[in-house]
């Protein structure tokens, strides 16, 4: 385990998360020794679609850097928000959600979770995928 201290970390290697999106590794427990926060960058090409999921006991914060995307969330994914560059999205812990980019151009966002690993606590909800 890395001892936590102030440090600068360059963007790391790309990896595909359980949700189906490609992320750039960033600040995590394994890169900086954090205990309760992680931060990565995700790029969603036009047409990208996540798998329906939730983060068990973990809050999520997103800042859209470029482009826009929509997020279906809540019971049976009945609610919808759209976020554009310069806007923030908050997702409470244990909230089912599914993100889609239908904007016609890529969307890039900074994603933070209240866990040292951005893939921790993910519960896939395949029974919700066909609802959107």
Image (cartoon, grey):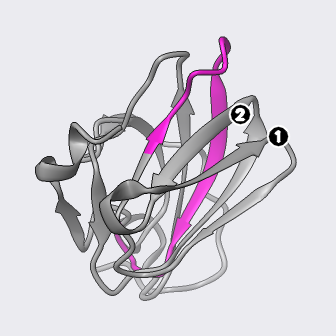
User: x, y percentage for residue 88?
Assistant: 75, 60
Q: What is the CA distance from the residue labelled 1 to the residue labelled 2?
A: 6 Å
Instruction: Name the residue nearer the viewer: 84 or 27.
Output: 84
Instruction: Please state if 7 lies on the left or on the right of 30 as rendered.
Output: right
Q: Which segment did they paint magenta?
A: 99-117
Instruction: Name the residue nearer the viewer: 131 or 15.
Output: 131
Vertical comparison of 113 with 130: above or below: below
> Dot 2 corresponds to which residue?
68
User: x, y percentage for residue 47?
Assistant: 47, 17
Q: Which sits earlier in the primary sequence, circle 1 or circle 2?
A: 2
For this orientation, the residue located farthest to the right is 86
For this orientation, the residue located farthest to the left is 127
Label for residue 51? none
Instruction: Please state if 40 lies on the left or on the right of 95 as rendered.
Output: right
> Dot 1 corresponds to which residue?
85
Q: Quadrant of residue 8?
A: bottom right
Contact between labelled residues 2 and 1, with CB atoms less than 8 Å apart: yes
Question: Which residue sits at x=48%, y=50%?
Answer: 72
Question: Which residue sits at x=56%, y=66%?
Answer: 112
Q: Is residue 116 magenta?
A: yes
- Name the quarter where the C terminus is drawn: top left
Instruction: Please state if 35 lies on the left or on the right of 125 as rendered.
Output: right
């Amino acid at each position: 385990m890395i001892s936590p201290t102030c440090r600068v970390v360059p963007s790391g290697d790309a990896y595909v998360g359980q949700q189906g999106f490609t992320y750039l590794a960033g600040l995590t427990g394994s890169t900086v020794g954090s205990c309760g926060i992680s931060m990565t960058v995700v790029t969603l090409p036009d047409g990208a679609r996540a798998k329906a999921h939730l983060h068990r006991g973990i809050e999520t914060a997103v800042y859209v850097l470029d482009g826009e995307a929509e997020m279906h969330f809540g019971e049976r994914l009945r609610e919808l928000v759209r976020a554009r560059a310069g806007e923030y999205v908050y997702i409470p812990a244990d909230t089912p959600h599914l993100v889609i980019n239908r904007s016609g151009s890529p969307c890039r966002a900074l994603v933070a979770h209240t866990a040292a690993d951005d893939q921790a606590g993910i519960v896939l909800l395949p029974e919700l995928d066909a609802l959107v």
